Amino acid sequence: QVQLVEAGGGLVQAGGSLRLSCVASETISSYISGWFRQSPGKERESVASISSTGGGTSYADSVKGRFTISRDNAKNTVYLQMNSLKPEDTAIYYCAARRGIRAVILIDSRYDFWGQGTLVTVSS
């Protein structure tokens, strides 16, 4: 069972950038990966997904053009580069994974493995 550990969260001013990382306990070359987030009082929402090879990506409309998901399978790591951050991006960000190859999935119920989350706070 793969374990995921997120890092890179923190406090940043609006307009700033952060890069989140998600390190897996085993090779993830056959896993689809995704990032999700949850703000206080709100349901968890999708942010981005990437296919196992990195050849396919998908983003929520709210982050398109600002966030970039990528992966380095040699390092068992998935990244989320977040630019032009807004206060509404404040949330706990979770990394997720499921077995699969070419697909990208923005539905949280389709994922089997989750990290513990990392908090991102964007001040205005």
Image (cartoon, grey):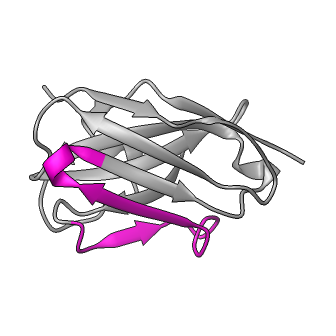
Question: Residue 52 appears at what percent x and percent y?
Answer: 17, 59
User: For residue 79: magenta?
Assistant: no
User: For residue 73: magenta?
Assistant: yes
Question: Residue 16 appears at what percent x and percent y?
Answer: 73, 56
Question: Residue 45 appears at what percent x and percent y?
Answer: 55, 48
Residue name at image x 56 percent, y 42 percent:
37
Taking the image as drawn, is residue 28 in sight? yes
Residue name at image x 71 percent, y 64 percent:
84
What is the span of residues highlighted in magenta in the rendered image?
54-77
Left or right of 46, for residue 72: left
Residue name at image x 81 percent, y 54 percent:
14
Left or right of 8, for residue 83: right
**Residue 92 sits in quarter:** top right
Most distant residue in the right direction:
124
Q: Specify the quadrant that holds the N terminus.
A: top left
Residue name at image x 24 percent, y 67 percent:
54
Query: 45 or 70: which is nearer to us?
Result: 70
Above or below for 114 versus 80: above
How many dots with numbers? 0
Taking the image as drawn, is residue 43 in sight? no
